[in-house]
Amino acid sequence: MSSITIHDIENALNEKLTIEARQRQISKNALIKQLLAEKMGLPVRGSYADDYREFVGLWSAEERVAFEKSQVENDSVDDSDWEGLSNLRGRHR
């Protein structure tokens, strides 16, 4: 593999790249590699996200919010779920 540097990127292009990278939840570097590969007709390598591309964008903003609200309880750990497990440590060594 090799590396390249791109100089003097216009502010408007940089802003669009930043927004697109955030939407895809990837770095700008990864986004630019994906865009270049796609434009050149090459497979996008090293990204398992392609396996799920057909599902991207299926939820509306309202559906996403509803899902996130339904998962709030899963954001915290109930210590009582783990009680009694400390004595299991070392059994599988």
Image (tube, rainbow, N blue to C red):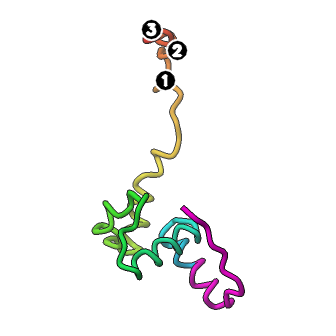
**Contact check, label 1 and label 2, Cβ < 8 Å:** yes
Q: Identify the residue shown where x is 39% and y is 61%.
A: 49
* Amino acid type shown at disc 2: Ser
Q: Identify the residue shown where x is 32% and y is 67%.
A: 53
Q: Is residue 73 left or right of residue 63?
A: right
Q: CA distance from mark 3 to mark 2?
A: 11 Å
Question: Magenta stretch containing residue 13, yes or no?
Answer: yes
Element at label 2? helix
Which mark is nearer the camera, 1 or 2?
2
Q: Is residue 66 left or right of residue 90?
A: left
Q: Note whether 24 is above or below 73 in the view shown.
A: below
Residue 23: % across, % down? 50, 73
Q: Identify the residue shown where x is 35% and y is 69%.
A: 43
Compare residues 44 and 93 and report the one nearer the observer: 44
Q: Mark 1 Cα within 10 Å, few/some/many (few <14, many 20+)?
A: few
Q: CA distance from mark 3 to mark 1?
A: 16 Å
Which label is found at residue 86? 2
Q: Which residue is mark 3?
A: 91
Q: Note whether 54 is above or below 12 in the view shown.
A: above
Q: Which contiguous range is marked in magenta?
A: 1-18
